[in-house]
Image (tube, helix red, strand yellow):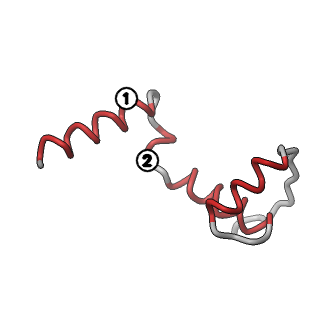
Amino acid sequence: MSKIMHAQMVIIEDDLIALKEKSGEKNTKDALAKAVAHYLECEYTQATDMWAKKLEKAMKKKSKE
C-alpha cells in the first residue's frame, strides 16, 4: 500500500499560471499532480540526453514520410 505524503514547494507565480494553462487545470493541486504524473511516465525523463533522443525520434519519423 502506498503512503500518501504532503509536499510543498516554492514556484514563480508566472510559472504556476503557465502550468495551469498548459495542463488545462484550474487549481494548483491538480496542475501539479498532472505535471508530476507526466514527468514520471515520460520516456524522455530517463534519457541521459533528452534532446538527442527527441531529435533522433523526429529524424526517424521524417525519414518514414
- The quarter of the picture where residue 58 lies is top left
Dot 2: element: helix
Q: Position of residue 4 (x, y in %)?
A: 79, 65
Q: How many marks?
A: 2
Circles 1 and 2: CB distance less than 8 Å?
no
Residue at 75% over, 72% down = 26
Q: Position of residue 53 (x, y in %)?
A: 36, 34
Q: SS for tag 1? A: helix
Q: Which mark is residue 43?
A: 2
Which quadrant, please, contains the N terminus? Answer: bottom right
User: Of callouts 1 and 2, which one flags the residue occurring earlier in the amino acid sequence?
Assistant: 2
Residue 47: x and y in percent read 44, 35
- Does 49 appear above or below 3? above
Closer to the observer: label 1 or label 2?
Answer: 1
Q: Residues within 10 Å of mark 1 (few under 14, many from 20)?
A: few
**Residue 63: which numbered mark, if any?**
none
Rendering coords of residue 39 (x, y %)? 58, 51
Q: Foreground residue, 5 or 9?
A: 9
Residue visible at 56% across and 52% down? 40
Picture layout, residue 20 above or below residue 49: below
Residue beneath disc 1: 52
Q: CA distance from mark 1 to mark 2?
A: 13 Å
In depth, the one of 60 and 17 nearer the eye is 17
Category of crowding for the residue at label 2, using alpha-carbon neighbours closer than 10 angstroms: few (below 14), some (14–19), many (at least 20): few
Q: Amino acid at mark 2?
A: Glu
Side of 29 where 2 appears, left or right:
left
Residue beneath the point at 70% across and 54% down? 18
The amino acid type found where label 1 is placed reads: Ala
- Give me the residue at 56% from left, 57% from top: 38
